[in-house]
């Protein structure tokens, strides 16, 4: 700590090499934020405790950085030794001095005019390893930049953007590799997860989330359905170094709302897949929503926690799924342990003791539409939950809303949307939301803090006993991590569609969040 | 299809508006647009298009370009790689048909209705053109959006169906003030209200003793007993005549 402050006073910003070992032990340097979810277990927990329920009333914005782009700002910044790396639409990377908020370098990528993304030209952040910064682009490239200068080191084509492939997720740097997921679930692509050699950009492995005819589990696609089966990988996964397993959620099967062309369970859509980090070989999978017709992507964050479960210490993976069920799995073998709804749902009567949902009668989309809860946007979505090892609670931004889903025609045309239906909002039912604290092994609600609208922002918890979150109406707020009491808020002036982080600037705790078209950094200054 | 070709010249008015074009447009809308805008264009993740005037497209040519080029900085993607020029016009024709009421021939005298609209106090709350109050929804183009039967029912029973964003609220503050009005905005912590005398209010919810949301209620009185049968016809005829497309 002393060394870092010394450097800053002398005015030298010196981002050191971010070795794999540093990311592995991210908790040893709480002043930095080295990987998308804070650590490989995806806790999105900051061990910093300078800001606490007693002094948070003094928390103020210190600086704001405004993006060039008007698109949604979904970025999670990384912070390394005084430099903040963040992304802006469409696929730009900006390095800022964390003291002043001033730009050190910017990498602006010109993307083709006809990139195909379902939901805006967004990017959720970078990965960093050694002296390289990695970003996926909306035209489906993975590129590496020099961390000091922002100059391009390599550029690898992941897929053809003209068929609807895109990258919006932050990559995950593991060992000497960069693991990157892809998007395009509304364009009938065939999903995969890739790993590239960090130094060269050479592809090392690819795991196809949808099998080719004749391969294992291809029978779950009833004929030709696999060809446009989607099951994309558009949210960053987690990593267990002891098991050497990468955990990654997969998206909806294509077409989203019309399952007629894909009879069967549609593996590995809506799954959590556990892959060998070295080879990309499947170790196990767990499917949350077999034969999904509601767009229940399982593109959420797998949270790795070791805890006692039924009198036995276990390696768990906790997963608040878009389908409104909270799951507890054994992450060594994928064994289903427990599920419990954390938001209103009407699509399943229950999750059985093997973890398979029992679909409710009358919840399947029809030509005229049926009312179902949750909304296809889910009980939660890509934005991150948090696990605090201090409070032993799992925090999730929950959405309470329904919709009318309907089935439509599903004609595949390369590069065109392939939805097979869609949804209508329910008039006079705008929905609402909540930050919910769940007991991690049972999913029981410990407290909730209600939100006016269904949220699109994730949460971070801190050792200071705080949870930070954001809402559609622009408030960035903080709650007491123990009981959910509101402690502090700030009106940012723009919708918050991002995840917060915490780090040290000038040796003092900071909290950062993207809101509207800006990044805000907060701190307590005497 | 994957090379963007700029159309040579785009007509100011949609050249493809036949019933068959609208039908084709409907089909194209269902597979390309409905996922965000809803199957009838009533909105969802995308904007509500079932209205006579569109925020982003002042005219046919504007609508053509919004569909073709998309709206940068939003989630609206360009359609030129999926739809050709003719198809874009067909979608535009369908979009224009949404929420648009065809001109009806009805009983009643428009000019007499306009006089009644003034003398009966409607202008206190409703804006027509550059005149009128702001408490109720503006009626400048109501005839394009609503048919005669609907408008007649509204005049008789105002609360029967209210615009989705329209909400009457009753507020009592901790220091005992009572405010009744229309909600302008609301969030977790605050609410903004226009009261019945057009005063603007903004409250932190912590400062309120009670906040009563009253969906299905309207401050507008019923005109069932205030307008004789003939007069009601006249007012409805006037409302029907308020169109944006003439």
Image: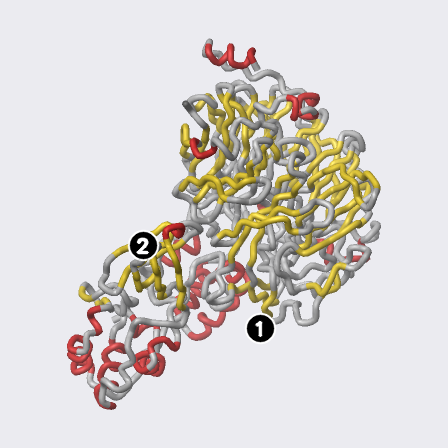
- The residue at the point 39 percent across, 54 percent down is B186
Q: Which secondary structure, mark 1?
A: loop
In the image, B148: left or right of A501?
left
Rendered position, B82 above or below A246: below
Q: Nearer the viewer, residue B3 or B171?
A: B171
Tell me whether marks 1 and 2 sit on the same chain.
Answer: no
- The residue at the point 62 percent across, 22 percent down is A29
Q: Which mark is residue A368?
A: 1
Q: Chain of mark 1?
A: A
- What is the crowding at mark 2: few (fewer than 14 residues within 10 Å), some, or many (at least 20)? few
Q: Chain of mark 2?
A: B
Rendered position, A432 above or below A525: below
Q: Which secondary structure, mark 2?
A: loop
CB atoms at circles 1 and 2 under 8 Å apart? no
Q: Nearer the viewer, residue B76 or B199?
A: B199
Q: Position of residue A118 (x, y in %)?
A: 55, 50
**Residue occupying the far bottom of the picture:** B229
Dividing the picture into quarters, in which one does residue A276 lie? top right
Q: Position of residue A252 (x, y in %)?
A: 66, 53
Residue receiving disc 2: B175
In the image, A217: left or right of A457?
right
In the image, B170: left or right of A372?
left
- Residue A183 appears in the picture as rendered: yes
- What is the crowding at mark 1: few (fewer than 14 residues within 10 Å), some, or many (at least 20)? few
In the image, B47: left or right of B128?
right
- The residue at the point 22 percent across, 89 percent down is B228
């Amino acid at each position: 700590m002393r060394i870092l402050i010394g450097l800053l006073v002398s005015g030298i910003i010196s981002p050191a090499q971010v070795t794999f070992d540093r990311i592995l032990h991210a908790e040893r340097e709480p002043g930095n934020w080295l990987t998308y979810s804070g650590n490989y277990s995806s806790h999105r927990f900051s061990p910093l405790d300078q800001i606490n329920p007693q002094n948070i009333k003094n928390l103020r914005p210190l600086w704001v950085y405004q993006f060039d782009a008007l698109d949604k700002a979904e970025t999670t910044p990384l912070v390394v030794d005084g430099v903040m790396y963040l992304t802006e639409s469409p696929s730009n990377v900006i390095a800022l001095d964390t003291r002043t908020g001033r730009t050190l370098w910017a990498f602006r990528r010109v993307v083709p005019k006809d990139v195909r993304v379902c939901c805006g030209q967004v990017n959720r952040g970078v990965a960093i390893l050694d002296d390289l910064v990695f970003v996926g682009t909306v035209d489906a490239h993975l590129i590496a930049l020099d961390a000091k200068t922002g100059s391009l080191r390599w550029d690898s084509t992941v897929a053809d953007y003209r068929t609807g492939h895109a990258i919006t997720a932050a990559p995950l740097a593991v060992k000497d590799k960069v693991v990157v997921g892809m998007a395009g679930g509304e364009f009938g692509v065939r999903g995969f997860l890739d790993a590239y050699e960090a130094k060269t950009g050479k592809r090392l492995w690819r795991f196809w989330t949808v099998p080719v005819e004749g391969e294992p589990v291809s029978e779950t696609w009833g004929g030709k359905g696999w060809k446009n089966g989607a099951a994309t990988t558009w949210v960053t996964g987690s990593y267990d170094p002891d098991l050497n397993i990468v955990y990654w959620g997969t998206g909806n099967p294509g077409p989203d709302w019309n399952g007629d062309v894909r009879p069967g369970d549609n593996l590995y859509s809506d799954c959590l897949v556990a892959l060998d980090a070295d080879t990309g070989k499947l170790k196990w999978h767990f499917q949350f929503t077999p034969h999904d017709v509601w767009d229940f992507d399982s593109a959420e964050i797998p949270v790795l926690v070791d805890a006692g479960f039924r009198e036995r210490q276990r390696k768990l993976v906790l997963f608040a799924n878009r389908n409104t069920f909270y799951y507890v799995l054994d992450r060594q073998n994928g064994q289903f342990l427990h599920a419990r709804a954390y938001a209103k749902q009407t699509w399943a009567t229950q999750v059985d003791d093997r973890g398979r949902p029992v679909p409710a009668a009358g919840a399947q989309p029809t030509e005229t539409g049926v009312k179902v809860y949750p909304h296809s946007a889910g009980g939660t979505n890509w934005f991150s939950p948090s696990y605090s090892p201090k409070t032993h609670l799992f925090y999730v931004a929950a959405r309470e809303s329904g919709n009318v889903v309907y089935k439509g025609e599903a004609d595949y045309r390369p590069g065109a949307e392939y939805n097979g239906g869609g949804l209508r909002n329910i008039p006079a039912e705008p929905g609402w939301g909540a930050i919910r604290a769940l007991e991690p092994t049972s999913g029981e609600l410990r407290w909730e803090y209600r939100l006016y609208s269904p949220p699109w922002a994730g949460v971070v918890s801190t050792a200071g006993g705080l949870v930070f979150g954001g809402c559609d109406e622009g408030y960035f707020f903080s709650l007491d991590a123990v009981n959910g009491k509101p402690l502090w808020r700030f009106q940012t002036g723009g919708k918050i569609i991002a995840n917060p982080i915490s780090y040290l600037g000038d040796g003092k705790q900071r909290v950062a969040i993207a809101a509207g078209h800006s990044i805000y950094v907060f701190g307590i200054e005497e | 299809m994957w090379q963007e070709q700029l159309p040579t010249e785009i007509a100011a008015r949609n050249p493809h508006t036949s019933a068959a074009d609208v039908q084709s447009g409907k089909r194209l809308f269902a597979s390309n647009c409905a996922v965000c805008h809803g199957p009838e264009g009533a909105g969802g993740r995308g904007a509500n298009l079932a209205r006579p005037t569109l925020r982003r497209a002042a005219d046919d040519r504007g609508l053509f370009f919004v569909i073709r080029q998309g709206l940068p900085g939003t989630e609206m993607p360009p359609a030129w790689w999926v739809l050709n020029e003719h198809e874009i016009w067909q979608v535009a024709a369908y979009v224009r048909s949404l929420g648009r009421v065809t001109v009806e021939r009805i009983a009643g005298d428009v000019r007499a209705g306009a006089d009644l609209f003034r003398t009966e106090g409607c202008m206190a709350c409703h804006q027509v053109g550059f005149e009128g109050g702001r408490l109720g929804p503006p009626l400048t183009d109501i005839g394009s959006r609503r048919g005669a039967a609907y408008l007649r029912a509204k005049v008789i029973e105002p609360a029967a169906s209210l615009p989705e964003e329209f909400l009457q609220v009753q507020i009592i503050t901790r220091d005992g003030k009572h405010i009744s009005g229309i909600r302008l905005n609301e969030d977790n912590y605050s609410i903004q209200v226009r009261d019945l005398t057009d005063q603007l209010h903004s409250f932190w919810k912590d400062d309120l003793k009670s906040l009563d949301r009253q969906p299905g209620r309207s401050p507008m009185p019923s005109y069932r007993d205030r307008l004789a049968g003939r007069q009601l016809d006249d007012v409805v005829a006037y409302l029907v005549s308020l169109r944006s497309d003439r």
